[in-house]
Image: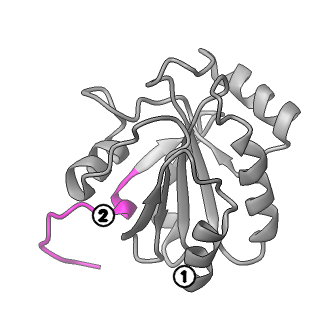
Amino acid sequence: MTGTSMAQNLYNFSINDIDGNVINFNEFQGKPILLVNTASRCGFTKQYANLSNLHREYLDKNLIIISTPSNSFKQELSEEEDVKEFCLVNYQTKFILTEIIDVKGDNAHPLYQWITSDYGKTPQWNFYKYLFDGQGNLVESWSSMTKPDSKKITSKIDQLI
């Protein structure tokens, strides 16, 4: 596809998964994406269980769940291997886990810089949730207080699939 627009789109971004493999967001075109900044030592960490439930519920419905572990709020383990083990052992996570990144400030990952600059949505704490439609547009975001498998979120996902 050719075009002269310089506007950023979700599909212009990539991030490494927790094992160091590149994830290109353009691979997910046409599918809704739930992006969540996470941490292993947070009061909301139990929401990993809700994310796992959501992943199982929508496994055959093209929903992509991407967890971005972050120490931006000083509550994440320092090593990717430890985060991966923590998530697998405690929450049997099967959705995408990325490398540990910053989600706010000058060192924020470019994806989160874009969300902040284009949508004015910066994570205020761990487990902020961002739902993108199949065209890469931010549809809605929710605070840490809203569980990933809550009706507020699943009803929006259901509209997109």
Residue type at mark 1: give it: Leu
Q: Secondary structure at mark 2?
A: loop
Q: Residues within 10 Å of mark 2 (few under 14, many from 20)?
A: some
Q: Is 73 located above or below residue 112 in the figure?
A: above
The image quadrant of residue 112 is top left
Q: Is 36 located above or below residue 75 in the figure?
A: below
Query: In the image, which residues are magenta?
Result: 1-13
**In magenta stretch: residue 15:** no
Residue 2 appears at what percent x and percent y?
22, 78
- Toward the front, the furthest residue is 145
Mark 1, residue position: 160
The scheme the figure's colours follow is: one colour
Residue 86 appears at what percent x and percent y?
78, 27
Q: Residues within 10 Å of mark 1 (few under 14, many from 20)?
A: some
Mark 2, residue position: 9
The image quadrant of residue 149 is bottom right
The image quadrant of residue 110 is top left
Q: Quadrant of the C terminus?
A: bottom right
Q: Secondary structure at mark 1?
A: helix
Front of the two marks 2 and 1: 1
Seen from the viewer's position, the closer of residues 17 and 56 is 56
Q: CA distance from mark 2 to mark 1?
A: 18 Å
